[in-house]
Image: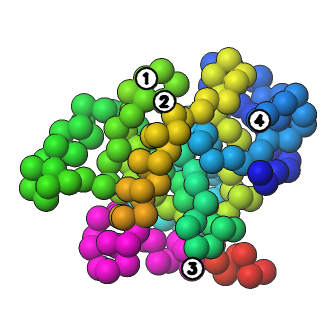
């Protein structure tokens, strides 16, 4: 597990409660670990300057949340998949894609923090650990995704990335540009 320094844990129930707690214990550092949702720093969105990204919407209580996982071939690169509470909207889009193409790898439906949500693989983007602000918590506890859901999101993301590399326009973000920015930053 890799530590992220100088980041705090936030609870959306009480934005003032950022106490610098650890993901796994009562320490002073947040940790990145697959299987959790995170909030991305505004610095990332300002740096990449991409209007297609789902950016932070509220002061104090970050939205959207992002499920993050390491790149399959470049471990220093992390993919962020936004979560949406608009399940009916994305269920309808997903159903239309399944009807038309026989499957849908761009939207995964599942539960997060006891609520149904849509994981928008179609809006994922790459970043590095420096841009992960904090883990998403409820009542000061990090919220984990079910391991089966984690596997499903990662499998769909891998498929979507492979299709995107072959020229399919199924991911809305500018993956080549964003990935080049992050890889160049990693070289510095």
Q: Position of residue 149 (x, y in %)?
A: 45, 40
Packing grade of label 1 (10 A; few <14, some 14-19, many >=20) is few
Disc 3 crowd rating (10 Å Cα; few below 14, some 14-19, many 20+) is few
| Near-viewer residue (89 or 75) | 75
For marks 3 and 2 on the same chain, the one whose residue lies earlier in the sequence: 2
Q: Residue at x 16, y 43 (%)?
A: 95
Mark 2, residue position: 112
x%, y% of residue 96?
13, 47
* Residue 28, horizontal then vertical, whole percent: 90, 37
Would residue 80 appear left or right of 135 to someone viewing this image?
Answer: left
Question: For the residues marked 4 and 3, what is the alpha-carbon distance in whole angstroms?
Answer: 30 Å
Residue at the front extreme of this rendering: 148
Q: Which residues are magenta?
A: 161-181
Task: List the residue tagged with mark 1.
Answer: 115
Is 125 rendered above or below residue 74? Answer: above
Magenta stretch encompasses residue 100: no
Q: CA distance from mark 3 to mark 1?
A: 35 Å
Please indicate whether residue 111 sits to the left or right of residue 43 in the image: left
Q: In the image as oriented, which residue stretches furthest toward the right?
A: 27
Q: Nearer the viewer, residue 159 or 15?
A: 159
Does the CB distance between marks 1 and 2 fall below 8 Å? Answer: yes
Report if residue 173 lies within the magenta region. yes
- Between disc 2 and disc 4, whose residue precedes? 4
Q: Secondary structure at mark 2?
A: strand
Q: Which residue is mark 4?
A: 23
What numbered label is drawn on residue 180?
3
């Amino acid at each position: 597990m890799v530590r992220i320094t100088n980041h705090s844990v936030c609870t959306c129930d009480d934005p003032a409660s950022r106490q610098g707690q650890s993901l796994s214990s009562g320490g002073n550092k947040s940790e990145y670990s697959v299987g959790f949702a995170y909030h991305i720093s505004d610095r990332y969105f300002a740096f990449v300057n991409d209007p297609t990204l789902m950016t932070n919407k509220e002061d104090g209580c970050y939205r959207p949340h992002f499920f993050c996982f390491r790149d399959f071939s470049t471990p220093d690169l992390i993919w962020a998949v936004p979560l949406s509470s608009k399940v009916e909207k994305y269920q309808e889009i997903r159903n239309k894609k399944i009807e038309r193409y026989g499957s849908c790898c761009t939207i995964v439906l599942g539960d997060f923090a006891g609520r149904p949500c849509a994981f928008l693989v179609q809006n994922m983007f790459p970043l590095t650990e420096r841009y992960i602000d904090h883990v998403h918590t409820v009542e000061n506890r990090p919220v984990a995704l079910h391991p089966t859901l984690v596997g499903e999101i990662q499998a769909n993301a891998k498929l979507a990335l492979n299709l995107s590399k072959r020229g399919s326009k199924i991911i809305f973000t500018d993956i080549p540009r964003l990935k080049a920015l992050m890889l160049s930053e990693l070289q510095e």
